[in-house]
């Protein structure tokens, strides 16, 4: 890896600075859905391991491996790095699963061959002056309760079993040893969106993990997510040296089906103490720029009180349906970030047509082949992101009502009873039922067919959501025209 044209970034007070002490604003994007696959991004139902099993059941192990190898090859290339640089992006957040570096069949044994995926992106981005944040998005035992850590359940076992935690510590020591001398790596995001229901184990684990990384690497910035999906930071206490604390900023209109912006509506994460739909009216709120700012200030209380940098680890908007309103919401978020000197990372880079600046071509071979499942997923609202749960009211309504009557005080972690019902019924039960149908879509395909289909993910076969591309580019240019330049 060539490192001659870069220097380590460091934290200095409320700024991230280069080797000359000049503040650097990070304008980032998450290359999500790639080394950590997500259902709403690339179109499969349920969770990643279920997708792999369904494809393997139909194609067999050899073609299954070829299927995913071609996906990994085409999704991110040198052209992608050059395109991101042309927008002014100067940081890529790279989410990955532990399964590339360690097998559940051989815990604690590091698979050195798996580093080639990370190495390739770090090198491609570095050649364009873009730094990388390494984001461990899936850990053994699942650090939270949702699909995006490859969790087929609604529980997080990572906080229950010490062995899972030991494996992550061992894994990060291997990662730190490999990249400690590479300044193209901006830093490490050791665990994405932890959600410890007790809120008692996450703090001690972070202390242990940070100490283990610092035994090997004192130079890279640590980007730490708060508990409860990067919302709660108070447990950290005094800030650590060379550390950034990263909130994820998802205002309610951006993920609520049927939302308007500005407008009054009810968020999906209704903390209603188990009262179900009867609590709808009192949970409605009017969202406009002022409310977006108020929400941001709440999420960044810890950073502002401790005088540490604000780096928004994720933001996007899947809703409202009206494109102009969605862009207005995103524009208001960017205005707020600018006001408070916050770096940002958009989530994510490519998808099948929900929120990314690049979308797979609608008439491309991949989308054409999976269209039946995309249509059925939309009809059944099985994805949290992009699924309109109102379409399944005839299924969900009686369950909500029965629970409200029989278990009025049930308020499960982390978002309450209504959310839990949606998770269990739609995002697990119905979603898993679709997996065999997804696998069947690829029956009879050979290597040439698979490779041609997976080329749908190449940059030249994607279409920009131009208004969003222009919005991001304009914010970067307005804030710091030189921000994308590499500083020595």
Image (cartoon, rainbow, N blue to C red):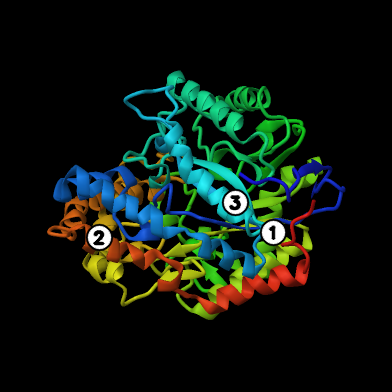
Residue closest to the eye, 445 or 197: 445
Instruction: State the SS at label 1.
Output: helix
- Depth check, mark 2 against mark 3: the one in front is 2
Instruction: State the SS at label 2.
Output: helix
Query: Percent from the top left, x then y, of residue 387?
Result: 36, 62
Is 171 on the left or on the right of 423, as rendered?
right
> Spatial distance from mark 2 to mark 3, Cα to Cα?
36 Å
Which quadrant, please, contains the N terminus? top right
**Looking at the picture, does residue 363 appear above or below residue 276?**
below
> Spatial distance from mark 1 to mark 2, Cα to Cα?
48 Å
- Depth check, mark 3 against mark 1: the one in front is 3
Instruction: State the SS at label 3.
Output: loop
Query: Percent from the top left, x then y, of residue 258?
Result: 43, 71
Is 256 on the left or on the right of 438, as rendered?
right
Q: Residue at x 75, y 62 (%)?
A: 483
Given contact means CB atoms under 8 Å apart, are the residues at marks 2 and 3 in contact?
no
Residue 450: give its label: 2
**Looking at the picture, does residue 251 appear above or below residue 361?**
above
Query: Percent from the top left, x then y, of residue 185?
Result: 64, 44
- Residue bearing the label numbered 3: 248
- Residue bearing the label numbered 1: 294
Is 324 on the left or on the right of 484, as rendered?
left
Q: Residue at x 74, y 44 (%)?
A: 303
Q: Is residue 284 visible?
A: no
Q: Residue at x 73, y 34 (%)?
A: 219
Is 180 on the left or on the right of 405, as rendered?
right
> Spatial distance from mark 3 to mark 1, Cα to Cα?
14 Å
Residue 94: give its label: none
Mark 2 Cα within 10 Å, few/some/many (few <14, many 20+)?
many
**Looking at the picture, does residue 174 appear above or below residue 131?**
above
């Amino acid at each position: 890896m060539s490192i001659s044209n870069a220097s380590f970034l460091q934290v200095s007070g409320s700024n991230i600075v280069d080797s000359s002490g000049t503040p650097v604003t990070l304008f980032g994007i998450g290359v999500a859905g790639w080394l950590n696959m997500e259902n709403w991004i690339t179109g499969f139902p349920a969770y990643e391991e279920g997708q792999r099993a369904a494809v393997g059941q139909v194609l067999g192990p050899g073609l299954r491996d070829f299927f995913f190898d071609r996906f990994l090859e085409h999704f991110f290339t040198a052209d992608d790095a050059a395109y991101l640089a042309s927008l002014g992006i100067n940081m890529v957040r790279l989410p990955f699963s532990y399964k590339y570096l360690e097998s559940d069949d051989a815990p604690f044994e590091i698979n050195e061959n798996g580093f080639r995926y990370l190495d390739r992106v770090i090198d491609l981005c570095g050649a364009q002056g873009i730094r990388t944040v390494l984001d461990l998005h899936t850990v053994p035992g699942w650090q939270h309760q949702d699909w995006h850590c490859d969790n087929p359940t609604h529980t997080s076992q990572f906080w229950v079993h010490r062995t899972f935690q030991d494996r992550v510590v061992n894994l990060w020591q291997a990662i730190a040893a490999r990249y400690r001398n590479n300044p193209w790596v901006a830093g490490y995001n050791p665990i994405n969106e932890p959600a410890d229901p007790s809120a008692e184990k996450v703090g001690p684990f972070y202390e242990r993990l940070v100490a283990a990384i610092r035994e090997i690497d004192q130079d890279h910035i640590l980007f730490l997510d708060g508990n409860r999906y990067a919302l709660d930071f108070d447990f950290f206490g005094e800030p650590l040296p060379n550390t950034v604390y990263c909130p994820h900023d998802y205002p309610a209109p951006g993920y609520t089906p049927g939302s308007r912006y500005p407008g009054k509506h009810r968020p999906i994460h209704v903390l209603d103490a188990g009262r179900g739909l009867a609590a709808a009216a009192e949970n409605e709120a009017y969202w406009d720029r002022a409310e977006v700012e108020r929400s941001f200030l709440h999420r960044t209380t810890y950073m502002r009180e401790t005088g540490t940098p604000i780096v928004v680890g994720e933001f996007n908007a899947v809703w409202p349906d009206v494109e102009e309103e969605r862009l207005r919401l995103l524009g208001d978020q960017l205005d707020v970030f600018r006001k408070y000197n916050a770096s940002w990372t958009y989530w994510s880079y490519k998808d099948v047509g929900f929120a990314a600046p690049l979308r797979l071509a609608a008439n491309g071979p991949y989308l054409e082949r999976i269209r039946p499942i995309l249509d059925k997923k939309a009809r059944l609202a099985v994805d949290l992101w992009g699924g309109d749960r109102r379409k399944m009211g005839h299924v969900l309504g009686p369950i909500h009502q029965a629970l409200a009557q029989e278990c009025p005080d049930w308020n499960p972690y982390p978002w309450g009873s209504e959310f839990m019902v949606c998770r269990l019924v739609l995002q697990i039960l119905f979603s898993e039922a679709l997996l065999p149908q997804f696998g069947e879509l690829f029956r009879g395909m050979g290597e040439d067919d698979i490779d041609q289909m997976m080329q749908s993910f190449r940059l030249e076969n994607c279409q920009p959501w131009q208004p969003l591309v222009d919005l991001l580019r304009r914010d970067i240019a307005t804030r710091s025209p030189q921000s994308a330049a590499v500083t020595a």
